[in-house]
Image: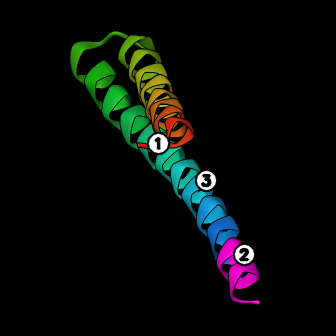
Amino acid sequence: MLAKKIHNMADYRAIFMLSAYGFAIVIASFLFLYIGRWLDEMFNTSPMFMVGLFFLAVFTCIGRLYQEAWLRKKGF
C-alpha cells in the first residue's frame, strides 16, 4: 500500500515539473517579446529583436527541459 502511494506521488511530481516548465516557457516568451519590442522601438528595427529574442527564449527553455530529462533518464 505504501509503495503504491509513493509511486502515485512520483507521478504527481513529474506532472508538476512538466507544468512548471510550461509556465516557464510562457513567462520567458512573453518577457523576451516585451524586451524585444522595447528594443525595436528604441532602435527602429521593426520585428528583428522581438522575433530573435522570442526564439531565443523558446529554444533555451526547451533545451533546458531536454537537458533535465536526459539527466533524469541517466539517474543523476
Q: Nearer the viewer, mark 2 or mark 1?
A: 2
The disc placed on residue 18 is 3
Give the mark nearest the N terminus, 2 or 1. Answer: 2
Q: Which residue is mark 1?
A: 30
Q: Amino acid at mark 1?
A: Phe
Q: Which residue is mark 2?
A: 8
Q: Residue furthest left?
A: 42
Q: CA distance from mark 2 to mark 1?
A: 33 Å
* Circles 2 and 3: CB atoms closer than 8 Å: no
Q: Nearer the viewer, mark 2 or mark 3?
A: 2
Instruction: Find residue 40 and report its horizontal and vertical position in percent.
Output: 32, 19
Q: Nearer the viewer, mark 3 or mark 1?
A: 3
> In the depicted view, which residue is nearer to us: 16 or 53?
16
The residue that appears at 30% across and 31% down in the rendered structure is 38
The residue that appears at 40% across and 10% down in the rendered structure is 48
Give the mark nearest the N terminus, 2 or 3. Answer: 2
The residue that appears at 41% across and 21% down in the rendered structure is 56
Q: Amino acid at mark 2?
A: Asn
Q: Is residue 41 above or below residue 47?
A: below
| Element carrying mark 3 | helix
The residue that appears at 41% across and 43% down in the rendered structure is 76
Residue 45: in magenta span: no
User: Magenta-highlighted stretch: main secondary structure?
Assistant: helix
Q: Which residues are magenta?
A: 1-8
Q: In what quadrant of the picture does the N terminus appear? A: bottom right
> In the depicted view, which residue is nearer to us: 32 or 7?
7
Estimate how packed mark 2 is, as few (under 14), some (14 to 19) or many (20 or more) residues with alpha carbons within 10 Å.
few
Instruction: Find residue 22 and report its horizontal and vertical position in percent.
Output: 58, 49
| Element carrying mark 2 | helix
